Amino acid sequence: MKGIRRMVLLLLVALLASGAASAQERLAVTLFGDAFMADESGQVLIPRGQYGAIYALAGGSYAFASKDGMRYALGREDGPVTEYEYDFLVVQCGEIYCMKGEKVGILTPEGETAMPCEYTYITPNGQGGYLALRTDPYDENPDGVYRVDAAGEETPTGVKVTHIYAYMQEGLLPAMSPDNGLYGYLDGDGVWAIAPQYEYAGSFVDGCAAASASTGAGLISPEGSWLVTPQYDYVDNPDRPGKYRAASAGGWLYLIDNDTWQIARRLEGGYASSGNGYLTVTCGGETALIGPDGEELFRLSDDHLISPWDIQGSCAVISQGEWGSESYYLCDLAGNKISDAYQWINSLGNGLYAAAEFQVETREYQDGALVLNEEVPGTMRTGCLNQEGKLIVPMEYETLYALSDTRLWMEKGDTGYLCDAEGNVIAEYDISDPEIPQ
């Protein structure tokens, strides 16, 4: 059961960190044990002092934490519409998952119960209903699969599984059969669409899934046939694949063409990482960035790290040097440096980047065998860069993150700031007081 709680906790942390706003562009700001909501102009809609946290869910709904942060209610932009009866509220697969103890359910954005908190696992089945389990999916005992239709009628499928660890994607759900200890895929009716035959089976992305047999890892089609022969130690299956994906075996790196499923390049001693359709390939003393269409955009010496996950538009994040030094900078997609160097840079989305500077201290671990540079607590100051590498928010804020595609939240001392995407301050708030003046 602990696995369920860990999974939901990770989703909750991600939601709080993102501070994402709903389609109505209501902006939920969570402080330490307090929260408020404002509109894009900075006008306070829900003042502080009422909730321990507020964060956006789906369909214009929000999670409202009690002041002690122990229970959650689902609500709209003007406040809760349910009681504080849930341990967690998170969005997964476009659905609002609610949790009571070790049981999960589904709520509508209006706060109605779509699935009661009676299950240990739920996934949308792509047919307007759900597949669900009532027993512990993380132990070794077989779990009966139930199909629940849109009206809430529950039907046993007659199938038993163990070790469900994913959600249904592209109409197929990987699961292990207790009969032979191998993985197959369930369809939306909760029966085996692809018979259990794999030692590992991942989720389907863009028409293929990573799977493995006794001979190694490969890729399979929605029919269960091998697209890429299972002969590798590892095959990448990114959420947003580009022209190539990486595979490795026996110290060699292989680039596989996603159109033909054939090996396009074979590199000795290389390694790769992927994200946003981009692929970085390091081999022979150099690191190259390959674009979504398969073209090589630029290459640098292999002491440079290129983060494919942080690429936005025409801008990439590069780091060179030990952590804690001014080793991060932005470059264009021709490899030209376009910003000053900072101690840390990461993507905020919508073409903006957070940059940071801080004091560093060296600490030894394992009797001096491990020496690390670490940030001195309380010394980090952040600012914001645009895609031209210009610092549009100065490096003086203790906290900085995106509330939406057009609004940033920043904190300095006892003052909070709402800022637009050009770095202009829209509103200021005294965050030391129990309520923010409107």
Image (tube, grey):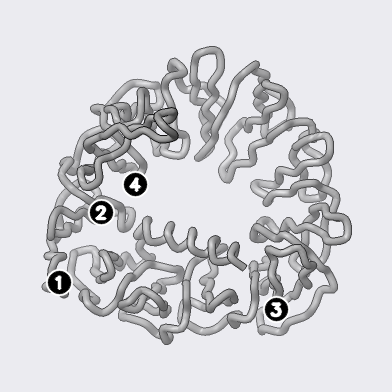
Inspect the image, locate mark 1, and give the three-letter code of the amino acid beneath it: Ile
The answer to whether marks 4 and 2 mark residues whose Cβ atoms lie closer than 8 Å is: yes
Q: Earlier in the sequence, mark 3 or mark 1?
A: 3
385 shown above or below 73? above
Q: Which of the marked residues, 2 or 3, is nearer the chain's N terminus?
A: 3
> Image quadrant for the N terminus?
bottom right
Residue type at mark 4: give it: Leu
Inter-mark Cα distance, 2 to 1: 18 Å
Pointer 1: residues within 10 angstroms few (<14), some, or many (20+)?
some
| Sequence-first tag of 3 and 4 | 3
The answer for how far apart the CA atoms under marks 3 and 1 are is: 46 Å
**Which secondary structure, mark 1?**
loop
Q: Identity of the amino acid at label 2?
A: Leu
Cβ–Cβ under 8 Å for marks 2 and 1:
no
What residue is shown at x 26% (from left), y 70% (from top)?
A: 34
Q: CA distance from mark 4 to mark 1?
A: 26 Å
Q: Residue at x 37, y 78 (%)?
A: 76
Quadrant in which the C terminus is drawn: bottom left
Classify mark 3: residues with Cα within 10 Å, few (<14), some (14-19) or many (20+): some
Marker disc for residue 330: none
In which quadrant of the rendered view does residue 326 lie?
top left
Which residue corresponds to mark 4? 348
Q: Position of residue 62 (x, y in %)?
A: 39, 73
First along the sequence among labels 4 and 2: 4
Q: Which residue is mark 2?
A: 408
Task: Give the percent coordinates (x, y) of residue 290.
Answer: 52, 26
Q: Secondary structure at mark 3?
A: loop
Q: Are marks 2 and 3 in contact (CB under 8 Å)?
A: no
The quarter of the displayed image where residue 30 is located: bottom left
Residue 14 position in % (x across, y down): 43, 57
Disc on the earlier residue, 4 or 1: 4
Q: Earlier in the sequence, mark 2 or mark 1?
A: 2
